[in-house]
Image (cartoon, rainbow, N blue to C red):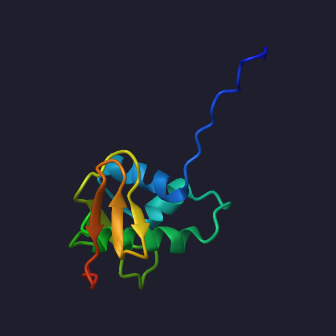
C-alpha cells in the first residue's frame, strides 16, 4: 500500500447480529438451526446467548412461537421450538435492553416493551 491508502474495512458482527440476519432471511428458525449455522466454538455459551435473545424478541412481539415444534433427535425429545418472524425491524439486529425491559430496533428507532410472561408453545 502506498501513503494515504488504508486496508479494506473488515466487517465483524456479533452472534446476535448474525442470528438476526438468518432469521430475517428464513422467516423462521429453531435454536439448534441457528447454532449449527453460526456457532464455531469461539463463542462463549452460544446456546444461552441465543436462547435469551430469542426469548427477549418473543416477549417483545418481534418473533412468535409456532404452534407445532420441529421433531428433536432424541426419542424422548419434545421437539425444538420454531420461532417465526412477526416484525421485520430492518437489517440491524434489535438490541435487548435489560435496564428498560424492552427491545430497541435501531433501524426504525422503535422501542418494543416486553410482556411480563412468555407464552409456552
| Residue that appears at 59% across and 45% down | 12
Q: Residue 10's image quarter? A: top right
List the single residue furthest toward the top.
2
Whether residue 101 can be seen here = yes
The residue nearer to you, when weighing 36 against 105, is 105
Q: Position of residue 72 (x, y in %)?
A: 41, 73
Q: Measured along the vertical axis of the image, is residue 20 above or below residue 35?
A: above
List the single residue furthest toward the right.
2
Whether residue 70 can be seen here = no
Look at the image and tell me in which quarter the N terminus lies: top right
The residue nearer to you, when weighing 76 against 22, is 22
Q: Measured along the vertical axis of the image, is residue 62 above or below residue 22?
A: below
Q: Residue 44's image quarter? A: bottom right
Q: Position of residue 32 (x, y in %)?
A: 46, 66
| Residue that appears at 33% across and 71% down | 102
Q: Report the side of 115 relative to 74 (left or right).
A: left
Q: Position of residue 56 (x, y in %)?
A: 36, 72
State how many labels appear.
0
Q: Measured along the vertical axis of the image, is residue 96 above or below residue 20?
A: below
Q: Position of residue 11 (x, y in %)?
A: 58, 39
Q: Report the side of 92 relative to 8 (left or right).
A: left
Q: Residue 116's image quarter? A: bottom left
Look at the image and tell me in which quarter the C terminus lies: bottom left
| Residue that appears at 43% across and 76% down | 99
| Residue that appears at 27% across and 85% down | 117
Amino acid at each position: 500500500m502506498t501513503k494515504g491508502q488504508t486496508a479494506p474495512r473488515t466487517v465483524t458482527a456479533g452472534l446476535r447480529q448474525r442470528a438476526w440476519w438468518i432469521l430475517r432471511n428464513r422467516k423462521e428458525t429453531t435454536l439448534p438451526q441457528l447454532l449449527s449455522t453460526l456457532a464455531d466454538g469461539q463463542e462463549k455459551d452460544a446456546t444461552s446467548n441465543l436462547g435469551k435473545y430469542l426469548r427477549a424478541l418473543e416477549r417483545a412481539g418481534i418473533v412468535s412461537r409456532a404452534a407445532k415444534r420441529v421433531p428433536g433427535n432424541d426419542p424422548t425429545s419434545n421437539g425444538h421450538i420454531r420461532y417465526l418472524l412477526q416484525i421485520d425491524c430492518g437489517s440491524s439486529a434489535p438490541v435487548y435492553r435489560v435496564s428498560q425491559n424492552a427491545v430497541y430496533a435501531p433501524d426504525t428507532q422503535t422501542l418494543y416493551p416486553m410482556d411480563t410472561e412468555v407464552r409456552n408453545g
